[in-house]
Image: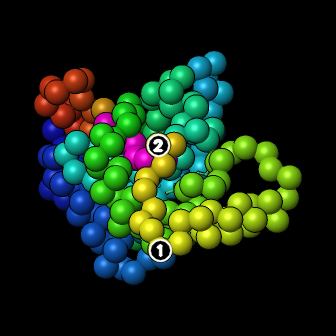
Amino acid sequence: MIESQQFDPDPFKQFTLWFADAEQAELPLHNAMTLATASRAGMPSARMVLLKEVDARGFVFYTNYQGRKARELKENPFASLVFYWQPLSRQVRVEGTVEMLASRESDRYFASRPRGHQLEAHVSAQSQVIKDRLFLEEQFKAFTEMVAGQDVPRPEHWGGYRLIPNTLEFWQEGEHRLHDRLRYRRHDNDPWVIERLAP
Ligand SMILES: Cc1cc2nc3c(=O)[nH]c(=O)nc-3n(C[C@H](O)[C@H](O)[C@H](O)COP(=O)(O)O)c2cc1C
């Protein structure tokens, strides 16, 4: 049993509470998270991405479907996320499997992005080696001119992923390094098991 009454038995509700606290604290990029993926051989890689949606289905982020993270997710759909909200002394870790969003969900989000971001998604072959910065700027300029006055459709190589968690851990700093660590884990759609971990 968890003796602490501070944690909601539903990890998504718990996450939503802490996420709202981070937003209210006006932290810069409170939705920035580290996304770790791994190749088929188990070689890990990590980078920051932005959380764009979260609900009981999981954590949504958007990216290029042909970059390194996408290649790794195709080979190995397991991934993890880490949030750190420094002034609140809180960390959240999330682990699970990743699925591509349905096209219409990605379309909807893409349509809401600033035009410059839409144009960039078309011209940047994420994670590929390029000659120099000028190459990128010329591609951007040429494409901008080509689609002048038209809506920019979502390119097929760009869209969202949803990480469906099977484990979440909420970490709150405590005095004398006696931090709280609450782990929620579940198998398939079984009820969540909540455990307290030693810091
Ligand atoms: C704060 C921050 C937020 C970022 N958000 C995203 C994002 O939402 N999607 C994305 O594709 N890249 C984002 N990036 C860039 C990634 O960290 C990374 O450089 C890029 O996605 C290529 O990663 P990959 O080569 O592992 O696929 C962000 C970078 C920073 C520093």
Disc 1 to disc 2, how far (Cα)? 21 Å
Q: Which of the numbered marks, if any, corresponds to residue 156? A: 2
- Is residue 164 magenta-colored? yes
What range of the chain is rendered magenta?
158-165
Q: Is residue 96 left or right of residue 14?
A: right
Please rate how many residues cluster around mark 2, counting C-alpha atoms within 10 Å: few if below 14, some from 14 to 19, many from 20. some
Residue 61, image x, y percentages: 41, 51
Q: Position of residue 45 (x, y in %)?
A: 63, 38
Q: Amino acid at mark 2?
A: Glu
**Residue 162 sits in which quadrant?**
top left
For disc 2, does the CB lie below 8 Å from ligand 1?
Answer: no
Residue ID for mark 1: 149
Q: Earlier in the sequence, mark 1 or mark 2?
A: 1
Amino acid type, residue under disc 1 in the picture? Gly
Q: Nearer the viewer, residue 74 or 87?
A: 74
Residue 28 lies left or right of residue 14; in this view the side is right
Mark 2 element type: loop
Quadrant position of the N terminus in the picture? top left
Q: Nearer the viewer, residue 93 or 23?
A: 23
